[in-house]
Structure formats: C-alpha cells, structure tokens
Amino acid sequence: MPTAETGFGHNRNATMTFVQLLGGREFRRLLASQVVSNLGSGLATVALLALVFNLTGSATAVGGVLALRLVPGAVAGPLGARLSRRWDRKRTLLTMDGVRVGFAALLPFVPQVWWVLGWVLAAEVAALVYLPARDSVVGDIVYDRDELPVANGLMLAATYGTLPLGAGIFAVYAATIGPALDGIPGGHLAPIFWADAASYAWSVLLISRMNIPTDREGQSADLLPRFRDAWRIPLVRRTTGPVVAAAFGLGTVFSLGIVFAVDTLGASEAQFGAFVILFGAGAGLGVGLMHLRPPESHLEAMWRGLGTLGVVLVGMSLAPAIGLALVAAVLFGAAATYAIVAAISVLQVELEGRRRLLAFTAFHVLLRLALAGGALAAGAVAEMLSAAGGFDPVRTVMVGGGGLVVASVLWHRWTNR
C-alpha cells in the first residue's frame, strides 16, 4: 500500500473522484450526517450567543462563551483516550451525538446563564471526543488512498463550511418568524435549539446504519493507550507542533480580522464580508490543489502549506489597502486547508487502529485549544500594545502570529532532519 512518504498515486479526474466517494455507501452516510449535524450546530452557535446576551445583557458574558472553549480540552483529551480503550468508534460517535441531542433539546427550558455555559462545556467535550473517532473512521471506509485528501476536504467543509450557512439561516429566521414565536415554551430561540437536536438525531440514525470496520490491532492491553501516550508516536510529534502554531495564527486572524479590515484598512462591512467569503473560496482551492497535483509526500506538503500560511499572514498584515488583503485572504485559506488536509491524510495512512484514534484525539484537542488561545491572546496583546502606544497594535500582533508559524515550521524541519 502506498504511504504518505511514497505518494498517493497519479493525478486523476476530480469529478470522478468525487462521484466515486459519494458512491461509497458508508462514506456517503457519514458525510450526510456531518453536513446536517454541523448545519444544526452552526444555527445553534449563533442562537447561543444571542441567548447569553438576552440573559445577561453583557458583551463580556458573550466573550466568555469563547473563553470557556479553552477548558474542555483538558477533559476531552484524557476522556477520548479512555473511551478508545473500552468502546469501538461507532459507539463513541453514537454516544456523543446522543449526548448533544439531549443537551440541545433541554437548553431552552432552563433560562439561566449557568446552565447555558455548562451546555457549552458539555458540547465542546462531546465534539472533542467525537472528531478523532470520525477522522479515524474515514481512513478505513475510504479504500482508495488517492481519494483520502478529497474525503478529508469534504469532512472539513462539512465541519466548518456550514457555520456561515447556519448563521445566514438564523438571520432569516430572526428577521421573519422568530419574533412571532416569543410566547412559546422556551422562547423564540427554542425552535433553533430543537432543530439542532433533530440534526444530531439524524446523525445518530445514519451512523447507526453504517458498517464501520473494527480496529485491526485488537484489544491487547499493550495497545490500549492513554492520552499522554500520543507524544510517544513520532509522527504525532512531527505534525502536531507546527499545526498548533498555525492554528494559533488562524486564531489571530479570527480575533483581529474585522478590526484589521475595518479600522486599519478602512474597509466597509461589505468588504469585510467579501474577506470572509474569499477565505472560504481559498479553502476550497486548497482542497482542489491537493487533488489536482498530488504531492509525492503528504508530510512535505504539510510543511509547504504551513510555511506558506505563515508568510501570507505576515504579508497580509502589511497590506496597505483592502484589495491586497482580499488577495491574501484567498492564499491564506488555501494554505491553511492544504496543510490541514495533508496532516490528516498522513495520520490516516501511517497509523492504524488505536494509535490512529489517539493521534487524532491529540490533534483535535490541541487544534481547538490553539484556535481559541490564539484568538484570546491576540486580542489581549493588541489591547496592551494600544495602551502603550507606538507601533500599530493590530499589524504588530498579526506579524507576530505569522512569524510564529514560520519559526515553528523551520524549527520542526531542522529538528526532524
């Protein structure tokens, strides 16, 4: 079988690969479950922020929702590794979706902020246990290794690409029928959370009908890992560090992007909307490049993508006008997706069974922590620099984020020669 170091084969027709992937019953069911459940999650995410603001009237409390996403990683990592000892991956997926059905359905009936914040913590833990099991499954139900990068790109699109669509649906709901439903039990936001619960129930139905291969490594005690054992896997050490640095850089853009576009570059809100759209278009371009020009080594492709991301972030932060920043947004999205898809593909091909699941647990926990940590740190540092005066705080922090990514890539390349 070809490996990540020897290549995934020759270039193929992208349309044919897409058709063949969707022709696989197990992959089709998994993808459909992800599209629907993540669309529901996107709806609920926006409704959750509105609910917290309605309950508290505090913008600080809304920001606390993001801060709380830092906490679950410390719980979900060891929990995910522990579940991998005792449960197969299908049971993990079904249980985590079931937990989210219950929390989403009950959320509107306890109109207290402590319950809402507790729901955020529980949902984040469930997601961080769920995602490693899902990505591990993809490596076993996509039998043609040439198709793995496209499969991973579709899963990323299902996970993150549905958030803007969910936000758009919520905006339409809030502007039309939402106010008329304010008198129902749970308030006018309740139907959004019930739709989220229904989306997870749909995912449970689809996944329950999947035939997911059992782990080939068996159940022997020496193969039942703990979360900290992930660092004993050389491939995890080679991929996770630079990916975490890149995620920190991404968090910087998420936190300061609107301030950079509107205040620093003088862009309109519509132009900032175009900035976000072009980032998404670039993400699609990154998946396409991975398939149209398959790299000889996906590990090398990950290094190239991450290095490009860091350089583009530095260049974007120095852009004198919004036009150049829009071009950079396309390149930034392409480099980020290209690198992450390559990293996921490497872990899927080079690792098996429990070790693959453990690697993805570490990967997703640290990725989410770095995204949230980067967003919070960027905002805090920019405020401190603004109070101190001198250099433009937003540009300075963004240059620092890009420099961190480039330095991490160079360091890991040097130490892993």
Image: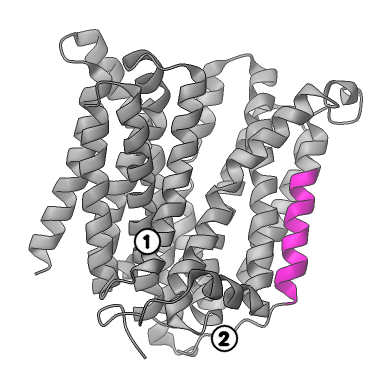
- Mark 2 touches mark 1? (CB < 8 Å): no
Dot 1 crowding, Cα within 10 Å, few <14, some 14–19, many 20+: some
Tell me the residue that label 1 is attached to. 289
Q: How many marks?
A: 2
The residue shown at (56%, 61%) is: 130
The stretch drawn in magenta includes residue 92:
no
Under tag 2, what secondary structure? loop
**Where, quadrant-wise, is the N terminus in this rendering?**
bottom left
On the rendered structure, is 182 left or right of 219?
right
Between 353 and 347, the one lying in front of the other is 347
Q: Identify which amino acid the numbered label 2 is placed on.
A: Thr
Percent position of residue 149, x then y = 43, 69
Instruction: Report whether residue 71 is seen.
Output: no
Of pointers 2 and 1, the one earlier in the residue sequence: 2
The residue shown at (49%, 90%) is: 218
Percent position of residue 276, x then y = 47, 34
- The image quadrant of residue 182 is top right
On the rendered structure, is 163 left or right of 355?
right
Dot 2 crowding, Cα within 10 Å, few <14, some 14–19, many 20+: few
Q: Identify which amino acid the numbered label 1 is placed on.
A: Leu
The residue shown at (38%, 79%) is: 349
Percent position of residue 403, x then y = 17, 39
Looking at the picture, does residue 195 appear above or below residue 57? Answer: below
Looking at the picture, does residue 339 appear above or below residue 67? Answer: below
Looking at the picture, does residue 44 appear above or below residue 158? Answer: above
Tell me the residue that label 2 is attached to. 214
| Residue segment shown in magenta | 195-209
Mark number displayed over residue 331? none
